[in-house]
């Protein structure tokens, strides 16, 4: 722990949305990042968070930190596509939020996604598909992952995009969509940021050997 | 005189921040934590990370 600067954020006011995009419905999330606001990894999901996997994500983050800024380009995808608002309180739904005694009302993380979804129609933009079905679970591409590891495959769905790409049980996903993968939350992030249909490149570690594969995501994969 | 007032204001702000951090720790029952934690202040986190060269671990967990 002493190899990191530890910060605890307890509410959503003032969150920089160019950095802190994550599964806002998860009750607990960790960002591993640096002072340049480059994100190394996300950790944490609605279920199955383990100390073992968090430790492995921390170790991976230290490796990435040791290679920064040489690896800056491969980390670029870890930051989100800019939203129309820079901070949470700029989202129209949150404007003017106050408690009865005049104090600003707390913004909980789970309020943020609802606010983003509600505010899009107001801008006459069609809500991007990724926001109507955000942070897809790995099963959406046909893999189940071990919650005690970074992103190790424990099961493959028959006829899924993952199986068709040649991913096998026992493979460890080390890169997805060009981003280093240190956790299941990272897989969800890469899928969230991935295409609505089309190719998604992956790199695997199969018994110590590096393997590049392409997962072809079919139209409608986010919601079917 | 102005310098003394400025110093007093800075001391008060620092004390208030420390008090708020202590309040949050107690409210959240973070009594058995390991290491030093910065509460609810990303700018302080970035500054410390820049000064020390360490990466950041930012835990987002709303107060229930």
Image (cartoon, rainbow, N blue to C red):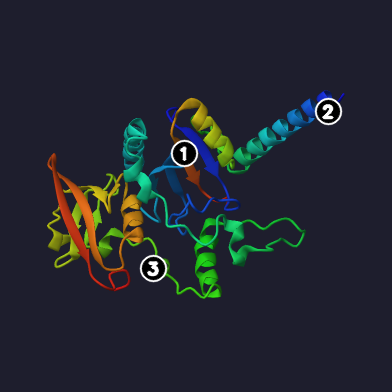
Real-space Cα separation, disc 1 to disc 2, in angstroms: 35 Å
Looking at the picture, how far across and down is residue B61, in whole percent? Answer: 51, 49
Q: Is residue A114 above or below residue B23?
A: below
N-terminal label among 3 and 1: 1
Residue labelled with disc 1: A36
Real-space Cα separation, disc 2 to disc 3, in angstroms: 54 Å
* Mark 3 belongs to chain: A
Looking at the picture, how far across and down is residue A65, in whole percent? Answer: 37, 34
Residue A215 is left or right of residue A182, and the answer is left
Residue labelled with disc 2: B5
Residue B31 visible, this angle: no
Q: Can you tell which of label 3 and label 1 is closer to the viewer?
A: 1
Residue labelled with disc 3: A133
Q: Residue drawn 53% across and 61% down? A: A112
Q: Quadrant of the N terminus of chain A?
A: top left
Marks 2 and 3: same chain? no
In the current view of this chain or complex, which residue is farthest to the right? B1
Residue A118 visible, this angle: yes
Q: Quadrant of residue A74?
A: top left
Secondary structure of the residue carrying numbered label 3: loop
* Mark 2 belongs to chain: B
Looking at the picture, how far across and down is residue A182, in whole percent? Answer: 31, 44
Secondary structure of the residue carrying numbered label 1: loop
Looking at the picture, how far across and down is residue A205, in whole percent? Answer: 17, 44
Residue A202 is left or right of residue A106, and the answer is left
């Amino acid at each position: 722990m002493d190899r990191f600067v530890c910060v605890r954020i307890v509410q959503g006011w003032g969150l920089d949305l160019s950095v802190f995009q994550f599964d806002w419905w998860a009750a607990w999330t960790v960002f591993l990042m640096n002072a340049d606001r480059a994100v190394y990894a996300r950790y944490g999901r609605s279920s199955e968070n383990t100390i073992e996997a968090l430790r492995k994500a921390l170790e991976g983050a230290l490796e990435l930190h040791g290679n920064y800024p040489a690896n800056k380009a491969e980390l670029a995808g870890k930051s989100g596509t800019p939203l129309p608002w820079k901070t949470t309180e700029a989202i129209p739904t949150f404007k003017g939020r106050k408690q009865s005694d005049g104090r600003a009302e707390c913004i909980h993380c789970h309020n943020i996604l609802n606010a983003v979804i509600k505010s899009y129609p107001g801008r006459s933009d069609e809500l991007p598909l990724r926001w109507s079905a955000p942070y897809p679970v790995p099963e959406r591409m046909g893999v189940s992952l071990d919650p005690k590891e970074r992103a190790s495959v424990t099961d493959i769905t028959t006829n899924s995009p993952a199986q068709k790409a040649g991913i096998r049980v026992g493979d460890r996903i080390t890169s997805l969509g060009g981003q280093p993968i240190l956790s299941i939350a990272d897989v969800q992030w890469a899928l969230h940021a991935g295409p609505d249909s089309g190719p998604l490149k992956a790199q695997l570690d199969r018994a110590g050997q590096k393997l590049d594969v392409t997962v072809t995501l079919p139209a409608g994969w986010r919601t079917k | 005189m102005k310098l003394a007032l400025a110093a007093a204001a800075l001391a008060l702000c620092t004390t208030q921040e420390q008090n708020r951090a202590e309040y949050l720790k107690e409210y959240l029952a973070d009594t058995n934590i390991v290491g030093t934690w910065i509460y609810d202040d990303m700018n302080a986190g970035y500054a410390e990370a820049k000064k020390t060269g360490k990466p950041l671990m930012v835990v987002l967990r709303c107060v229930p």
